[in-house]
């Protein structure tokens, strides 16, 4: 058994593992810098947010190590139960959840708070992997695409009632996994057209969503555009190489909640364009290693797991940076491994444990014939 474990570790994607650890450590360093002012003002402790994130990161790394040493098929078998639990927890948060900043997204578990929507992302990846694997001989049909997306509607509807950005990510994960499992490109053109039509109707249904579009186009004309403008100031003032680690001015109350969604602007201010580009390259390398794991997965389940994790990570990184740079309207998406959020870090590292587990079982190249 000892030799078998050693062999499995030797097969583990060391590059992916190193990238995950580097991103986690980098996130902790930047979080300490971005949050020290808010921590000192609100709690009298400049390391308040850092300590909580450090605990979550240590817990997440431990969970990642445990998961990567277990057979990923075991977790896929638990997928239906995980999906059901995610629905129950998401319903519970609507009634007994803790409200913070006008949003009811957290459940209190003693001294700890838990965000069920983060668990829902992992549950959806596992559930769709389980479901698609059972339909693997019929994945080219339009009925398969419709049926698969239909199963996501309960969790999307519940989560979307108070956390629209996470609901969109869950839908994106569904599209990514259908794309990985489907051998044709043409149906996705129709899906894209329907998606655009749905987005237009969805935005027009509520006035505050149209207001977000107006703020996005002219943030200086609206009071709610303050955060966007200050974030852009931070990015612009950083120049090529930045003001230096810990020397951000915009984090001193100008960028609201600098440790959360807008932390990329603080990174650019302190480390400059060079620091922002390096961080983006780290994410690109991690996505590349996930793509390699998809190609070398030993079976469809492994490929789907890595595909779902890759889609989740890519969407969050792209959407967060796009929001901070005002490329798209504000959606409230966190930056993986970097933004403050213990639940997010723990479950994201758990996902990476699944991907590393797939890489340790890889055999040859897993390919799809697309038309």
Image (spheres, rainbow, N blue to C red):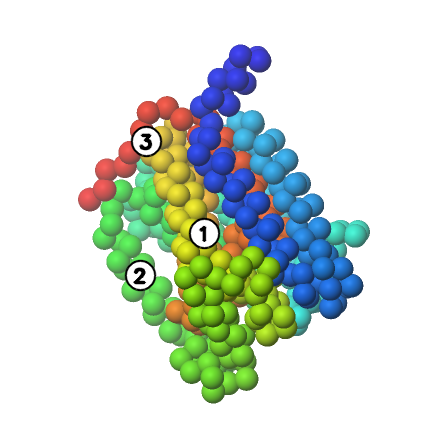
Q: CA distance from mark 2 to mark 3?
A: 26 Å
Q: Quadrant of the C terminus?
A: top left
Q: Residues within 10 Å of mark 2 (few under 14, many from 20)?
A: few
Which residue is found at the position 56% from the left and 45% from the top?
A: 24
Mark 2 or mark 1: whose residue is earlier in sequence: 2
Q: Position of residue 320 (x, y in %)?
A: 47, 61
**98 and 85: which one is in front?**
98
Q: Is residue 5 above or below residue 113?
A: above
Count of numbered marks? 3
Which residue is found at the position 72% from the left and 59% from the top?
A: 46
Q: Which residue is mark 1?
A: 279
Q: Which residue is mark 3?
A: 366
Q: Is residue 42 left or right of residue 12?
A: right
Q: CA distance from mark 1 to mark 3?
A: 29 Å
Whether the residues at callouts 1 and 3 have beta carbons within 8 Å, the answer is no
Which residue is found at the position 50% from the left and 85% from the top?
A: 222
Mark 1 or mark 3: whose residue is earlier in sequence: 1
Q: Residues within 10 Å of mark 1 (few under 14, many from 20)?
A: some
Q: Is residue 75 above or below residue 258?
A: above
Mark 2 or mark 3: whose residue is earlier in sequence: 2
Badge 3 element: loop
Q: Which residue is mark 2?
A: 192
> Farthest residue in the left direction?
371
**288 and 69: which one is in front?**
288
Q: Position of residue 288 (x, y in %)?
A: 37, 42
């Amino acid at each position: 058994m000892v030799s078998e474990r050693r062999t499995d570790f030797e097969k583990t994607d060391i590059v992916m593992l190193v990238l995950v650890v580097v991103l986690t450590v980098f996130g902790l360093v930047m979080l300490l810098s971005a949050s020290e002012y808010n921590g000192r003002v609100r709690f009298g402790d400049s390391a308040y947010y850092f300590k909580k994130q450090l605990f979550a990161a240590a817990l997440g790394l431990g969970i990642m190590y445990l998961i990567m040493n277990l057979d990923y098929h075991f977790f896929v078998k638990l997928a239906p139960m995980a999906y059901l639990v995610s629905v129950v927890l998401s319903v519970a948060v609507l009634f007994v959840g803790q409200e913070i900043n006008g949003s009811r997204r957290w459940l209190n578990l003693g001294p700890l708070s838990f965000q069920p929507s983060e668990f829902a992302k992992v549950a959806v990846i596992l559930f769709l992997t389980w479901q698609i694997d059972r339909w693997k001989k019929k994945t080219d049909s339009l009925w398969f695409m419709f049926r698969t997306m239909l199963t996501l509607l309960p969790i999307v509807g519940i989560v979307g009632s108070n956390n629209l950005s996470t609901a969109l990510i869950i839908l994106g994960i569904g599209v990514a996994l259908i794309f990985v499992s489907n051998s044709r490109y043409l149906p996705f053109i129709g899906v894209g057209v329907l998606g655009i039509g749905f987005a237009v109707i969805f935005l027009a249904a509520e006035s505050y969503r149209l207001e977000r579009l107006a703020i996005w186009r002219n943030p200086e004309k609206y009071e709610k555009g303050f955060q966007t403008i200050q974030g852009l100031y931070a990015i612009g003032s950083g120049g090529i190489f930045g003001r230096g680690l810990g020397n951000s001015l915009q984090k001193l109350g100008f960028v609201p909640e600098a440790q959360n969604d807008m932390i990329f602007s603080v990174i650019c201010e302190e480390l400059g364009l060079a620091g922002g580009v390096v961080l983006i390259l780290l994410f690109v390398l991690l996505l590349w290693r996930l793509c390699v794991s998809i190609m070398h997965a030993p079976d469809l389940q492994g490929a789907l797991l890595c595909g779902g994790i890759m889609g989740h990570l890519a969407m969050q990184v792209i959407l967060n940076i796009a929001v901070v740079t005002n490329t798209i309207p504000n959606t409230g998406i966190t930056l993986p491994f970097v933004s403050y959020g213990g639940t997010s870090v723990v479950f994201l590292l758990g996902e990476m444990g699944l991907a590393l587990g797939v890489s340790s079982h890889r055999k040859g190249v897993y390919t799809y014939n697309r038309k």
